Structures are given as structure tokens and as C-alpha cells.
Image: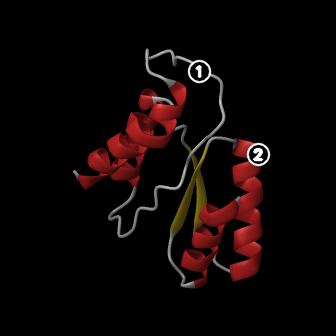
Amino acid sequence: AGIGKCVAMDLARRNARTILACRSRERGQAAVEEIRAATGNPAVLLRLLDTGSLASVRAFASAVLREEPRLDVLVNNAGVTGLPFTITSEGLEQTFTTNYLGPFLLTNLLLG
């Protein structure tokens, strides 16, 4: 939703292979279908990613590096606000992990 979806829509309109990295399979698939219909670009894909889980970030990055011949653009747009103080199963504060550590790790893993 929001800025991330608008960016994905614009990239798809430019005929780019576009991967939507989403926490929710249902919301992500709905966005993929909407973007494909609006742009006529069949190369819009959904991959699950929760930047609040470093294990999820590592799995996502590994799959992208394995499956994609190249990566030209990365847009880190995930974020949360207003959550109660929560510690993740990895022992990290949830908001900090989701908004900063996860995207930082993802970027560095994808740089190779």
C-alpha cells in the first residue's frame, strides 16, 4: 500500500521485472494482481519478507541472489510505527529491527 505500491506500479509500467516483498501473502498477492492488471506487465512477482525477522531477511536475500540474474534497483520502504515495546524471537526490539536493522541487513546481503 502507499508509497511502496506506487513505486512498484511505476517500475512495472516501465516494463521492469518487479518483486514485491511483503509480509502478508494475501495483501501482497492483491497488490501484484492490481499492478499486473494496471500495467499489463506479467513480470510482477510476490516474495514474502518480514524485515522484523533477520531470519526472514536472510532467506529472502538468499532466494533473490539465487533466482535473479541481476538486481538493478532496491527500494527499502517497509516500516512500522506506534507498536508497543516488543522483543523479537531473535532478542531485538521489534520497531528498530523492522525499520532499521532488517533493511540494513537486506541491502548489505544483496550487495554481494
Front-lying residue, 41 or 26: 26
Image disc number at residue 44: none
Residue at 43%, 14% in the rendered image: 91
Q: Position of residue 5 (x, y in %)?
A: 65, 65
Q: Looking at numbered disc 1 in the image, what kind of residue is underneath it?
A: Phe
Local secondary structure at mark 2: helix
When asked about the image quadrant of residue 86, the answer is top right
The answer to whether residue 110 is above or below residue 12 is: above
Residue at 53%, 27% in the rendered image: 94
Left or right, 42 with respect to 71, comes to: right
Left or right, 86 with respect to 30, comes to: left
Q: Position of residue 54 (x, y in %)?
A: 42, 30
Quarter of the picture containing the N terminus is bottom right
Which residue matches tag 2? Answer: 26
Within 10 angstroms of label 2, few (less than 14), some, or many (20 or more) residues?
few
Color style of the picture: secondary structure
The answer to whether residue 71 is above or below residue 103 is: below
Q: Looking at numbered disc 2 in the image, what kind of residue is underneath it?
A: Glu
Q: Position of residue 55 (x, y in %)?
A: 43, 28
The answer to whether residue 112 is above or below residue 5 is: above
Left or right, 105 with respect to 33, comes to: left
When asked about the image quadrant of residue 3, the answer is bottom right
When asked about the image quadrant of residue 8, the answer is bottom right
Residue at 33%, 63% in the rendered image: 69
Local secondary structure at mark 1: loop
Marks 1 and 2, how far apart at CA: 26 Å
Q: Does the CB distance between marks 1 and 2 fall below 8 Å?
A: no
Which residue matches tag 1? Answer: 85
**Between discs 1 and 2, the one toward the N terminus:** 2
Front-lying residue, 49 or 77: 77
Within 10 angstroms of label 1, few (less than 14), some, or many (20 or more) residues?
few
